[in-house]
Each structure stands twice: as C-alpha cells, then as structure tokens.
Amino acid sequence: MTPAMNTDLNKSTYRRFIQDVFNEGHLEEIDDLLAPDYTLHDAPPGTPAGREGVKQIVARFRAAYPDMAITIEDQVAEEDRVCSRSTLRGTHKGEIFSVRGTGKAVTMTSSTMVRIKGDESPKAG
C-alpha cells in the first residue's frame, strides 16, 4: 500500500502540519510537508503561490493571534484525501486581513480538505 492510500498516515501527516506549523510556528516544516506545486485554492488576493504563500498566511495568523492553538475536532479520510474540522482559539492582538487587533478572545471553526501525494515522504498538495 502506498503512503497516499494509507488513510491513517495521511491524517497523521495533516495533524503534524497543524501542530508543527500553525501551533508551534515551525515555518521551515512547510518545505517538508507541502509539495513544491502545492495549490492553496482559497488564498487571499495578493498571496504568492505555493509554499511561500502558505508561509505568509501562517505568519499573519501567528502575528494576529500569538497564543493561537488549533485543535482538530474530526477527520475523515478516503484514498488520498483528508477532510478535517478544526477549531482555532486565540486572542486577537494583531492586524489580519485589514482588521486591527481587538484584544478579544476568538474562536473560529473551519473545514479543510487536502490531498496527500504518495511518495517516500507524504506531502500535502
């Protein structure tokens, strides 16, 4: 079975992305976890394509919500796709998407679907 078909490994890869990159701020992990041709379909206007765009978005969120923590509530995987429902909690201290920091606690839920490409080191794509 190739890594792309191992749904448990695929879910674990996405959990690692959330924990290492968003929660802990290890932006260098993006190069290991995302394929070079990664496409972020809902990127804000003006965001660079690929890994660099993801790095910018993560940096914006971490600056706006310095105590941010994302919890994956549910995950479903089939073949090379992983869908996750997550909750972000943090304090809105910095500007993000033209909204100045409010100092208030924030809770946001989201659903994300990623495709895990199969090779020796699975990468989200």
Image (cartoon, helix red, strand yellow):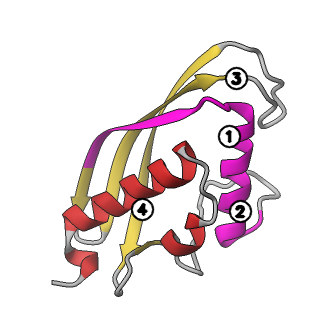
Q: Residue at x 24, y 51 (%)?
A: 76
Could you tell which of marks 4 and 2 lies nearer the N-terminus? 2
For the view shown, which residue lies furthest in the left direction?
A: 1
Q: What's the mark number on residue 62?
A: 1
Which amino acid type corresponds to the residue marked 3 in the rendered image?
A: His
Does residue 102 appear left or right of residue 76 in this picture?
right
Where residue 62 sits in the image (x, y, percent)? 68, 40
Asked whether disc 4 touches disc 1, contact meaning CB atoms under 8 Å apart, the reply is no
Q: Nearer the viewer, residue 65 or 25?
A: 25
Q: Residue at x 77, y 66 (%)?
A: 48
Distance between the alpha carbons at the discs numbered 4 and 2: 16 Å
Q: How many marks?
A: 4
Which amino acid type corresponds to the residue marked 4 in the rendered image?
A: Val
Residue 1 lies in quadrant: bottom left
Could you tell which of marks 1 and 2 lies nearer the N-terminus? 2
Distance between the alpha carbons at the discs numbered 4 and 1: 21 Å
Per the image, the residue denoted by label 4 is 114
Asked whether disc 3 touches disc 2, contact meaning CB atoms under 8 Å apart, the reply is no
Q: Residue at x 35, y 87 (%)?
A: 119
Where residue 85 sits in the image (x, y, percent)? 37, 40
